[in-house]
Amino acid sequence: MMTMTIRHAALAACLLAALTSMSARAQDDALYRQFGEKEGLVRIVDDMYASVTVDPRTAPYFENAPIGRIKTKLVEQFCVLLDGPCVYTGRPMRRSHEGQNIDRAAFNALVEDLQAAMDKNGVPFHAQNKLLAKLAPMYRDVQDRE
Ligand code: HEM
Protein backbone atom coordinates (compact mmCIF):
# COMPACT_ATOMS: atom_id res chain seq x y z
CA MET A 1 0.00 0.00 0.00
CA MET A 2 2.78 2.34 1.04
CA THR A 3 4.80 1.50 -2.08
CA MET A 4 1.81 2.24 -4.30
CA THR A 5 1.36 5.65 -2.68
CA ILE A 6 5.00 6.54 -3.18
CA ARG A 7 4.80 5.30 -6.76
CA HIS A 8 1.69 7.40 -7.37
CA ALA A 9 3.29 10.46 -5.85
CA ALA A 10 6.37 9.97 -8.06
CA LEU A 11 4.16 9.54 -11.13
CA ALA A 12 2.18 12.65 -10.29
CA ALA A 13 5.40 14.61 -9.79
CA CYS A 14 6.69 13.44 -13.20
CA LEU A 15 3.43 14.38 -14.89
CA LEU A 16 3.43 17.76 -13.23
CA ALA A 17 7.03 18.40 -14.31
CA ALA A 18 6.21 17.37 -17.89
CA LEU A 19 3.11 19.57 -18.01
CA THR A 20 4.98 22.52 -16.51
CA SER A 21 7.78 22.22 -19.04
CA MET A 22 5.22 21.85 -21.90
CA SER A 23 3.39 24.96 -20.84
CA ALA A 24 6.69 26.82 -20.31
CA ARG A 25 7.65 25.90 -23.88
CA ALA A 26 4.25 26.98 -25.26
CA GLN A 27 4.61 30.21 -23.31
CA ASP A 28 8.21 30.73 -24.45
CA ASP A 29 7.58 30.81 -28.17
CA ALA A 30 4.14 32.48 -27.97
CA LEU A 31 5.65 35.80 -29.03
CA TYR A 32 7.50 34.20 -31.94
CA ARG A 33 4.22 32.61 -33.06
CA GLN A 34 2.44 35.98 -32.94
CA PHE A 35 4.92 37.15 -35.56
CA GLY A 36 3.98 34.23 -37.81
CA GLU A 37 7.17 32.25 -37.04
CA LYS A 38 9.97 32.16 -39.62
CA GLU A 39 7.75 32.86 -42.66
CA GLY A 40 6.11 35.80 -40.89
CA LEU A 41 9.49 37.28 -39.97
CA VAL A 42 10.74 36.90 -43.56
CA ARG A 43 7.65 38.82 -44.82
CA ILE A 44 8.02 41.54 -42.18
CA VAL A 45 11.74 42.04 -42.86
CA ASP A 46 11.09 42.05 -46.66
CA ASP A 47 8.42 44.75 -46.24
CA MET A 48 10.58 46.72 -43.83
CA TYR A 49 13.50 46.70 -46.29
CA ALA A 50 11.26 47.61 -49.22
CA SER A 51 10.61 50.79 -47.18
CA VAL A 52 13.99 51.61 -45.63
CA THR A 53 15.72 51.38 -49.01
CA VAL A 54 13.41 54.09 -50.48
CA ASP A 55 12.58 56.13 -47.36
CA PRO A 56 14.64 59.34 -47.86
CA ARG A 57 15.53 59.29 -44.14
CA THR A 58 17.24 55.89 -44.35
CA ALA A 59 17.88 55.08 -48.05
CA PRO A 60 21.33 56.78 -48.22
CA TYR A 61 22.66 54.38 -45.57
CA PHE A 62 21.75 51.36 -47.67
CA GLU A 63 23.08 52.46 -51.07
CA ASN A 64 26.01 50.05 -51.12
CA ALA A 65 24.83 47.69 -48.44
CA PRO A 66 24.45 43.90 -48.83
CA ILE A 67 20.64 43.92 -48.49
CA GLY A 68 20.17 40.15 -48.93
CA ARG A 69 22.67 39.41 -46.16
CA ILE A 70 21.24 42.04 -43.79
CA LYS A 71 17.71 40.64 -44.24
CA THR A 72 18.83 37.08 -43.50
CA LYS A 73 20.73 38.16 -40.37
CA LEU A 74 17.89 40.40 -39.22
CA VAL A 75 15.35 37.56 -39.48
CA GLU A 76 17.69 35.44 -37.33
CA GLN A 77 18.14 38.26 -34.84
CA PHE A 78 14.42 39.02 -34.52
CA CYS A 79 13.73 35.29 -34.14
CA VAL A 80 16.21 35.10 -31.22
CA LEU A 81 14.76 38.25 -29.62
CA LEU A 82 11.29 36.70 -29.84
CA ASP A 83 12.53 33.46 -28.18
CA GLY A 84 12.17 31.51 -31.41
CA PRO A 85 14.30 28.46 -32.29
CA CYS A 86 17.11 30.33 -34.09
CA VAL A 87 20.75 31.24 -33.75
CA TYR A 88 22.07 34.67 -34.75
CA THR A 89 25.05 34.20 -37.07
CA GLY A 90 25.66 37.86 -37.95
CA ARG A 91 28.22 40.32 -36.71
CA PRO A 92 27.87 42.23 -33.44
CA MET A 93 25.70 45.37 -33.72
CA ARG A 94 28.47 47.82 -32.91
CA ARG A 95 30.81 46.33 -35.51
CA SER A 96 28.15 46.31 -38.31
CA HIS A 97 27.15 49.93 -37.76
CA GLU A 98 30.23 51.83 -36.69
CA GLY A 99 31.36 54.66 -38.96
CA GLN A 100 27.95 54.94 -40.67
CA ASN A 101 26.97 58.15 -38.92
CA ILE A 102 23.65 56.73 -37.75
CA ASP A 103 21.79 59.22 -35.56
CA ARG A 104 18.52 59.22 -33.60
CA ALA A 105 16.48 60.43 -36.60
CA ALA A 106 17.70 57.58 -38.84
CA PHE A 107 17.14 55.05 -36.05
CA ASN A 108 13.58 56.30 -35.41
CA ALA A 109 12.82 56.25 -39.14
CA LEU A 110 13.93 52.60 -39.42
CA VAL A 111 11.80 51.72 -36.39
CA GLU A 112 8.78 53.45 -37.99
CA ASP A 113 9.28 51.42 -41.17
CA LEU A 114 9.43 48.27 -39.06
CA GLN A 115 6.20 49.26 -37.29
CA ALA A 116 4.44 49.75 -40.62
CA ALA A 117 5.67 46.30 -41.75
CA MET A 118 4.41 44.69 -38.53
CA ASP A 119 1.01 46.41 -38.95
CA LYS A 120 0.77 45.25 -42.55
CA ASN A 121 1.46 41.66 -41.46
CA GLY A 122 -1.12 41.67 -38.67
CA VAL A 123 1.21 41.46 -35.66
CA PRO A 124 -0.84 42.30 -32.53
CA PHE A 125 0.00 45.67 -31.01
CA HIS A 126 1.24 44.31 -27.65
CA ALA A 127 3.52 41.84 -29.48
CA GLN A 128 4.92 44.69 -31.62
CA ASN A 129 5.71 46.61 -28.45
CA LYS A 130 7.60 43.67 -26.99
CA LEU A 131 9.95 43.57 -29.99
CA LEU A 132 10.33 47.37 -30.03
CA ALA A 133 11.22 47.33 -26.33
CA LYS A 134 14.02 44.87 -27.07
CA LEU A 135 15.33 46.94 -30.00
CA ALA A 136 15.24 50.33 -28.27
CA PRO A 137 18.37 49.79 -26.12
CA MET A 138 20.30 48.72 -29.24
CA TYR A 139 20.45 52.36 -30.25
CA ARG A 140 23.51 52.55 -28.01
CA ASP A 141 25.32 50.11 -30.30
CA VAL A 142 24.25 51.38 -33.75
CA GLN A 143 24.57 55.13 -33.18
CA ASP A 144 27.59 57.25 -34.03
CA ARG A 145 26.14 60.45 -32.63
CA GLU A 146 23.09 61.68 -30.69
C1 HEM B 1 17.81 48.18 -33.59
C2 HEM B 1 18.08 48.60 -34.80
C3 HEM B 1 18.91 47.81 -35.79
C4 HEM B 1 19.12 46.47 -35.86
C5 HEM B 1 18.58 45.37 -34.95
C6 HEM B 1 19.99 46.24 -37.01
C7 HEM B 1 20.43 44.99 -37.43
C8 HEM B 1 21.37 44.79 -38.42
C9 HEM B 1 21.92 43.50 -38.78
C10 HEM B 1 21.52 42.16 -38.15
C11 HEM B 1 22.84 43.70 -39.74
C12 HEM B 1 23.69 42.62 -40.46
C13 HEM B 1 24.92 42.27 -39.65
C14 HEM B 1 25.86 41.40 -40.44
O1 HEM B 1 26.18 41.73 -41.59
O2 HEM B 1 26.31 40.38 -39.92
C15 HEM B 1 22.86 45.13 -40.03
C16 HEM B 1 23.64 45.74 -40.96
C17 HEM B 1 23.44 47.02 -41.40
N1 HEM B 1 22.60 47.96 -40.83
FE1 HEM B 1 21.47 47.73 -39.21
N2 HEM B 1 20.28 47.43 -37.59
C18 HEM B 1 19.63 48.42 -36.88
C19 HEM B 1 19.63 49.77 -37.16
C20 HEM B 1 20.12 50.31 -38.31
C21 HEM B 1 19.90 51.68 -38.74
C22 HEM B 1 19.10 52.73 -37.95
C23 HEM B 1 20.54 51.82 -39.94
C24 HEM B 1 20.60 53.02 -40.84
C25 HEM B 1 19.59 53.83 -41.00
C26 HEM B 1 21.18 50.54 -40.25
C27 HEM B 1 21.95 50.28 -41.35
C28 HEM B 1 22.64 49.10 -41.59
C29 HEM B 1 23.56 48.91 -42.71
C30 HEM B 1 23.88 49.93 -43.81
C31 HEM B 1 24.08 47.61 -42.58
C32 HEM B 1 25.10 46.90 -43.50
C33 HEM B 1 26.52 47.14 -43.04
C34 HEM B 1 27.50 46.45 -44.00
O3 HEM B 1 27.74 45.25 -43.84
O4 HEM B 1 27.97 47.12 -44.92
N3 HEM B 1 20.89 49.66 -39.25
N4 HEM B 1 21.95 45.75 -39.19
Image (cartoon, rainbow, N blue to C red):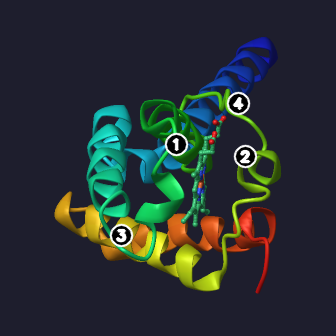
The x and y percentages for residue 78 are 53, 47
Look at the picture and state if 49 lies above or below 1: below
Q: How many marks?
A: 4
Which of discs 3 and 2 lies nearer the camera? The answer is 2
Q: Earlier in the sequence, mark 4 or mark 2?
A: 4
On the picture, is 45 further left or further right than 122? right
Which of discs 1 and 3 lies nearer the camera? The answer is 1
- Tell me which corner region of the image, top left, top right, bottom left or bottom right, holds residue 121: bottom left
Dot 4, crowdedness within 10 Å: few (<14), some or many (≥20)?
few
Q: Could you tell me if the residues under marks 4 and 2 are in contact, i.e. CB atoms within 8 Å?
A: no
Say which mark, if any, is on residue 113. Answer: 3
In the image, 77 versus 21, the foreground residue is: 77
Residue identified by numbered label 4: 13
Q: Earlier in the sequence, mark 1 or mark 2?
A: 1
The x and y percentages for residue 125 are 33, 75
Mark 4 vs ligand 1: CB under 8 Å? no
Mark 2 vs ligand 1: CB under 8 Å? yes
Residue identified by numbered label 2: 96
